[in-house]
Image (cartoon, rainbow, N blue to C red):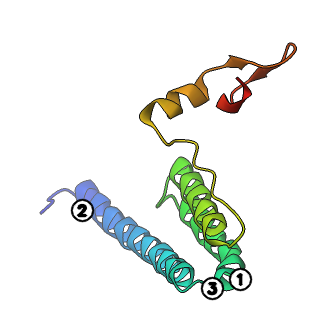
Amino acid sequence: MANHASALKANRQSEKRRNANRSNRSQLRSGLRKFESLLEEQKSEQARAALPVLYALVDKAVRKKSLSRNAGDRQKSRLTRRLTGSVPGRRSRNLRTTPAASHRERQRLPCEGKQVCVITMCR
């Protein structure tokens, strides 16, 4: 246990932040579970309607700093890919089928003319 006043105050602050972060993460996880259950039940229209609400939860977690900005962007990207992969008639674009694919995606490849392309399909 802390003895100095500043250490006691820091302990109180960290406890308060921990509880707030825990609450924000819990809300986000609950929303993610609901979204996953909608996808598993093949209710893609309801999942599509729930996606903006889930985006708001992710953005709120980023704003409250219980989730980093990159992690929030990654979550939103994965959610969108999950939704488009579950909708009949649509196909999820998974370019990273091999370990070398991620390297090839970043590699700059010449296209027709003077343009430079990052996509591997342009060869």
Viewer-proximal residue, 88 or 53?
88
Q: 27 or 106: nearer the eye?
A: 106
Residue sitting at x 78%, y 19%: 111
Q: Residue at x 86, y 13 (%)?
A: 114
Report the side of 115 relative to 90 (left or right).
right
Residue at (56%, 58%) from the top-left corner? 78
Q: Amino acid at mark 1?
A: Glu
Residue type, numbered disc 3? Lys
Tell me if mark 3 has few (under 14), some (14-19) or many (20+) residues whose alpha carbon lies within 10 angstroms of its own: some
Residue under label 1, please give it.
45
Q: Exactly how many numbered labels are in the figure? A: 3
Q: Amino acid at mark 2?
A: Leu
Picture coordinates of residue 88, whole percent (x, y): 68, 73
Mark 3 → mark 2, Cα distance in angstroms:
50 Å
The reply to whether dot 3 and dot 1 touch (C-beta < 8 Å) is yes
The answer to whether residue 1 is left or right of residue 51 is left
**Which of the marked residues, 2 or 1, is nearer the chain's N terminus?**
2
Of pointers 3 and 2, the one earlier in the residue sequence: 2
Disc 2 target residue = 8
Of the 4 image quadrants, the one containing the N terminus is bottom left
As drawn, 110 above or below 42: above
